[in-house]
Image (cartoon, coloured by chain):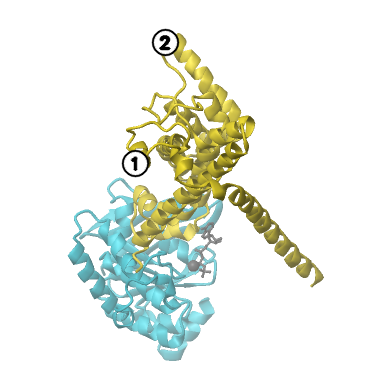
Chain colours: A cyan, B yellow
Amino acid sequence: MQYCAKIKDLSVSFHGRKAISNISTELPSCGITVLLGRSGSGKTTFLRSLNRLNEIIEGYEGSGNVNLFLGGRSRDIYSDDAPEPTELRRRVGMVFQTPNPLPMSIRRNIILPLSLIPGSKKTENEERMESVLKTTGLWDEVKDRLDTPAGRLSGGQQQRLCLARILALEPEILLLDEPTASLDRRASEVIEKHLLSLKNKYCIVMISHSVRQALKLGSHFIFLRGGNIVASFSKGELPEGKEAENLFNDLL
Amino acid sequence: MNRVKLLKILSYISAFFVLASFSLLIGFIFVKGAPSIKLSLFFGDTNPWQAIIGARPVWNGIWPAFVGTLYLILLTMLISLIPGIGCGIYLARYAEGKSKEVLSLAVDLLASVPSIVVGLFGFVLILLLRHTIAPNATTCIILASFCLAILVMPALVVTTRSSIESLPEALLMTGASLGFTETQLLRHILIPAAGKGILGGIMLAMGRAAEDTAVIMLTGVVVNSGLPAGPTAKFEAIPFLIYYTSAQYIDRDDLLRGFGAAVILLILSAGLLFIASRLQSTMEKRWKGAK
Ligand SMILES: Nc1ncnc2c1ncn2[C@@H]1O[C@H](COP(=O)(O)OP(=O)(O)OP(=O)(O)O)[C@@H](O)[C@H]1O
Ligand SMILES: [Mg+2]
């Protein structure tokens, strides 16, 4: 089996309080890995340790190894061999739990991060913007108001904009923190469909609060509780139908 | 319920109080000063065009003081803008621990120095220069601007710092997650997003530079020098002219000219504020990319 991430003895604490402790696990490179666990169990922290985003939080302390499969080889992202954190974060893109568009127009939200990459070209950026907006199903909804503030979009549209923004940076690994948390069922289904269509192109690690969604999208499952992994399965190991759902509910 | 009502009434009264004192002040000055606002207030008996191009001196008009004040504000901003805003950014984003504490204390202390003391400092500085490297040094417009810059710098530092620090934390997270470096984060997100607050500091600084009398009185302002002849020349300035007129006016007309000058000073600073805010809103529009 191919891995996109190998994590060994990972611990993270904020202001001396452990958020995750001694986690060791491996994330397969194909399909979607779903993290499940109660509120405060360390899911977001775990995700952030894959793109070194915990480090900018006050009171952070961490230890352990995270090896990511980037650019065709495995690299320990906390060692000297790793790309700079800023470059790493472009290659390991993250979409947050709550939509976080920048306080500017829809167009600038996507173009600004792109334009800061050395050697990027204006026309290419515009093309890429159009293509990612189409991928996330947003193009038809926003194509004639690209220059209006992104904050005027609905919650679900903003979430898809954030997804599009990160896709535009062409990451190799995608970290999604409850991408459908603030959406109704219909909007969730739209995003889920997009995720399934993306899963062969990217290594996706996502957090979900819904067992049903996890079972629908995931091919690998990790359960966190109090900062520890309490169980992990791949799709093949699960019982059929309703029983899998019951098993998951028991673990939460 | 009653407390809520009381609070509401109090806040209405306070708002009214501010508005009333503002209108009273502005109204009074305008009523007194407006009648004397004509070309001759500026240029006296001199042909305006020749006065503007500097071909002929103006003896009994406020034009030299007007230009002097304008130069003073521009030079002050030129000297103070970069260090003031830069120091605010440093305090908000880079400084840590002891050095942050010491620097913020220094800024607070500087903010509490009365302007007359800053003026004295400039005066002593010139004395020092005369006794050491520059025996011919004398008080002049560049010295006055330098001292004014010291006076207004704390306002720039504090407003820049607090407007950057009060930006939502999520903005930092978002920027970092998109691979922005610290410099890019500042340049493309934090500073533009804090633009309105920083502009507030600039307005405060310009206002102080425009009105301050104590500093310039000790650093080179004179009653009659004509247009400032260069950075090391003596100069006239409207606030000093107003001050001087109010103390030494000869007749009623003279006094009314003083009020006219006050109105002009108000209009001058309002104009500068207007330009600054237009500039800021244009830059903000560009940054947001909104049409
Ligand atoms: N920015 C932060 N500063 C300080 N402590 C934090 C921060 N983020 C998370 N923590 C702490 O880390 C622990 C795990 O939080 P985390 O956000 O990873 O949980 P989560 O599983 O994502 O929860 P939820 O489902 O509610 O999002 C919590 O105890 C929390 O207090
Ligand atoms: Mg979370």
| Res A201 seen here | no
Label whose residue precedes the other's in the sequence (2 or 1):
1
x, y percent for residue A69: 27, 61
Q: Residue at x 50, y 38 (%)?
A: B209
Whether A56 is drawn above or below A125: the answer is above
Give the residue at mark 2. B135
Single out the mark in the foreground, 2 or 1.
1
Mark seen at residue B140:
none
x, y percent for residue A155: 45, 77
Quarter of image, res A125: bottom left
Q: Is residue B167 left or right of residue A79?
A: right
Whether B129 is drawn above or below B251: the answer is above
Instruction: Give the Cα distance between marks 2 and 1.
Output: 38 Å
Output the chain of dot 1: B
x, y percent for residue B154: 53, 38
Whether A245 is drawn above or below A102: the answer is below
Quarter of image, res B285: bottom left
x, y percent for residue B180: 34, 54
Relative to the observer, which residue lies in front, B114 or B58? B58
Q: Residue at x 37, y 37 (%)?
A: B51
Q: Secondary structure at mark 1?
A: helix
Give the residue at mark 1. B49
Q: Disc 2 residue type?
A: Pro
Output the chain of dot 2: B
Task: Give the class, few, some or many, for how many residues have Cα within 10 Å of label 1's Cα (few <14, many ≥20).
Answer: few
Q: Secondary structure at mark 2?
A: loop
